[in-house]
Amino acid sequence: MDYFFWAFDKKCAANNIQVDWFFPNQSDHGEYVTLTIFESGYQSVENHFLSFCTTNATAYTHIITHFVELCTPFFYKIKQLSVAKIIAVDHNPRPLSGYPLKKRIEKRIKGVLFSRYIAVFVGVSDYTVKEIIHDFGSHLKKKTLTIYNGVVLENILQRMNRNTLHPIFLTASHLRESKGIQDLIAAVALLPTSIQKEIKIDLYGDGPYKSILVEKMKYYDVAHCFAFMGSISNLKALFSEYDYMLQPTHMECFSLSILESLAANVPVITTNVGGNEEVIVSGKNGFIYKAKDVMALKNILEAVYLGHKRIETNTRTLIENRFSLARMVEYHLALVLENKS
């Protein structure tokens, strides 16, 4: 989201709109130095913002939240301090099996109590919009819309010659259970021995689940098929060195790494969760399978590795037309301009 924050701030400035940003801490990388940032420090961002509004004469026309839980007392408290219109952007994935009954009831109650204080709900995919309405009530349909995430195309190199036989793979995700890398390990263990001897999958990212993944690789005797590459700051520049990206995730909202991979002309093999099927058309720019279906993943891997399945189109075109960062920024700016007090 860094690039979006920078681009949105710049676009607002060009339209004589001043933006104050409330983050957990200051940052000096990239274009953050050009933003007006108020860091929360030891407080949560929400509490810091409420304290700021209490002690300062703010005259905000709009308050936009990202990565903040929806329909909580926080939104009621904002309205006691400000007349600004609140736009809540939902980036949060949902569990594959849904929320427990108690949490579903709590969310529906919160929807009744606190949704009235939010002027617009924005989902980053149609899946997210559907889940917002499902979580908090059908009365939100009229003020909920989709604005897809977008990526900076200029920074992403394209794969020019994709290997249709014995392709090379990468994954790019935080290493936690919900990302499903353990399914990929199990699927590789089912491949014919001849493929296991040759296949190479680079794993980009880090996280608390890494040690468990290492043990699973040892258990299945497939550690030689994988390489942990760690967290890489310039990953977007590396997508083009691969033929396919693997994303065996169990839960997703709308994946930027999928967009970046496609923008590099690297097809994606992923699951049918979240907004994945809103960007991946199986057989056209990647392959979709049911989450946790290890055998289905194994079959796709085998067919792709042997050249029996292949993606021949340039996958960047879709991203240029529908999922660019410029398009995302324009839609968010229009939302603010349309909802001016």
Image (cartoon, rainbow, N blue to C red):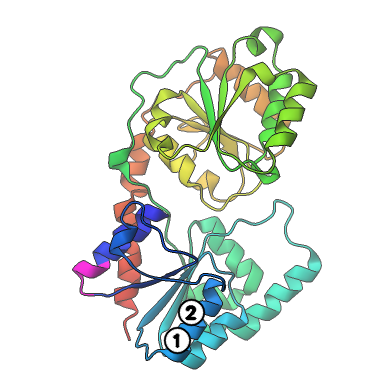
Residue extending farthest top = 194
Q: CA distance from mark 2 to mark 1?
A: 6 Å
Residue 316 location, quadrant: top left
Crowdedness of circle 2 by 10 Å Cα count: few (<14), some, many (20+)? some
In the image, what residue occupies the spot 33% across and 22% down? 160
Circle 2: residue type? Phe
* Residue highlighted by disc 1: 53
Q: Measured along the vertical axis of the image, is residue 67 above or below residue 181?
A: below
Q: Main secondary structure of the magenta part?
A: helix
Query: Which quadrant is home to the N terminus?
Result: bottom left
Q: Residue at x 30, y 58 (%)?
A: 7
Q: Nearer the viewer, residue 55 or 268?
A: 55
Give coordinates of residue 31: x percent, y percent.
30, 56
Q: Which mark is residue 49?
A: 2
**Quarter of the figure that contains the C terminus:** bottom left
Q: Is residue 295 visible?
A: no
Query: Which structural element holds mark 1?
Result: helix
Residue at the image position 38 percent from the left and 51 percent from the top: 150
Side of 309 where 223 appears, left or right: right
Segment tinted magenta in the rendering: 12-16
- Would you call the spot at circle 1 few (<14 residues within 10 Å), some (14-19), or many (20 or more)? some
Residue 282 place in picture, x, y as percent: 53, 34
Amino acid marked by disc 1: Cys
Q: Decide whether residue 13 is among the magenta residues.
A: yes
Query: Is-magenta flag for residue 52?
Result: no
Which numbered circle lies on residue 217? none
Residue 132, image x, y percentages: 59, 67
Identify whether 72 is placed above or below 163.
Answer: below
Q: Are marks 2 and 1 in contact (CB under 8 Å)?
A: yes
Element type where label 2 sits in the image? helix
Residue 223 seen: yes
